[in-house]
Amino acid sequence: METQMYMLRDIPHQERPRERMLQYGAGALSDAELLAILLRTGTRQESAIHLAQRILKQVGSMRRLVDMSTEEMMAIKGIGSAKAVQLRAGIELGQRLARTRMDQPVVIRSPRDAADVLMEQLRYLQKEHFVCLFLNTKNHIIAQETLSIGSLNASIVHPREVFRAAIKCSSASIVCAHNHPSGDPTPSHEDISMTLRLKEAGEIVGIEVLDHLIIGDGEFVSLKEQGLM
């Protein structure tokens, strides 16, 4: 059976992603169209837009694509090292932009302030990432560090790692956070237990744990606000 060829020239000019973006703006494009622009080219058998559609169908969603490594992307038919690097670079730029703030120091006055800093970084990740925001005496963020990736439990997130990092940057207090890949930010018993251990350790070393946020898909829970620490 002859394989059907899908080339960009077969797509009407006004329906091509780059032309549509120039005419209508990026917001008018679908996920597949934006992905096709990052890919730039397709394969001998399919256009960039058809390749992008197949990639999204195979991985399931843009959320899954965001968390894939370069090697995982290269395992998809039609993505070589160059395309994988292009995709990872585009994703990384988006994530860095989400972390970008104005020149003024970011001040954490409430759980919402911390959630605003971390939400777009953590909400799409498919593995649990435990992150700390390190603050000075004026509650300005002076550093941020990811201290563990994987299943969250007491053996992975140990107080000594958290406070070693806090002491290294002369932090006066910290806000902890981690994501729930399910999208549901409801704290687990392990989350609560680990938070209490961190709070107790902070009292010993003189670095206050202000809060622990659980980040879901567009929503969060503050253990401080819930009275769980």
Image (spheres, rainbow, N blue to C red):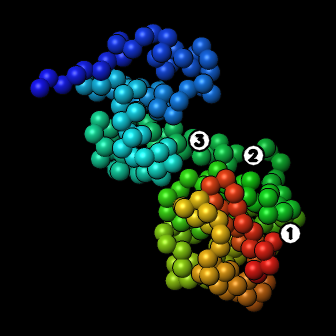
Residue 13, image quadrant: top left
- Mark 2 or 3: in front is 3
Sequence-wise, the earlier of marks 3 and 1 is 3
Instruction: Please provide percent x and percent y for residue 187.
Output: 65, 73
- In terms of image quadrants, where is residue 214? bottom right
Q: Earlier in the sequence, mark 2 or mark 1?
A: 2
When the figure is inspected, residue 40 is found, relative to residue 163, above or below; the finding is: above
Residue at (51, 38) in percent of width and height: 90
User: Which amino acid, mark 1?
Assistant: Thr
Q: Nearer the viewer, mark 2 or mark 1?
A: 2
The kind of residue on which mark 2 rests is Arg
Determine which of the numbered discs, if any, sits on residue 94 in the image: 3
How far separated are the C-alphas under marks 2 and 1? 20 Å
Left or right: 210 in relation to 22: right
Instruction: Identify the residue shown where x is 40% and y is 26%.
Output: 49
Q: Which amino acid does the dot numbered 3 rest on?
A: Gly
Q: Say which of 73 and 102 sits in front.
A: 73
- Between the C-alphas of marks 2 and 3, the distance is 13 Å
Query: What residue is disc 2 on?
Result: 101
- Against 102, residue 118 (above or below) is below
- Residue ID for mark 1: 137
Is residue 38 left or right of 78 when viewed as pictured? right
Q: Position of residue 113 (x, y in %)?
A: 80, 57
Discs 3/1, front: 3
Asked which secondary structure carries label 3, the reply is helix
- The image shows residue 154, relative to residue 30, as above or below, that is below
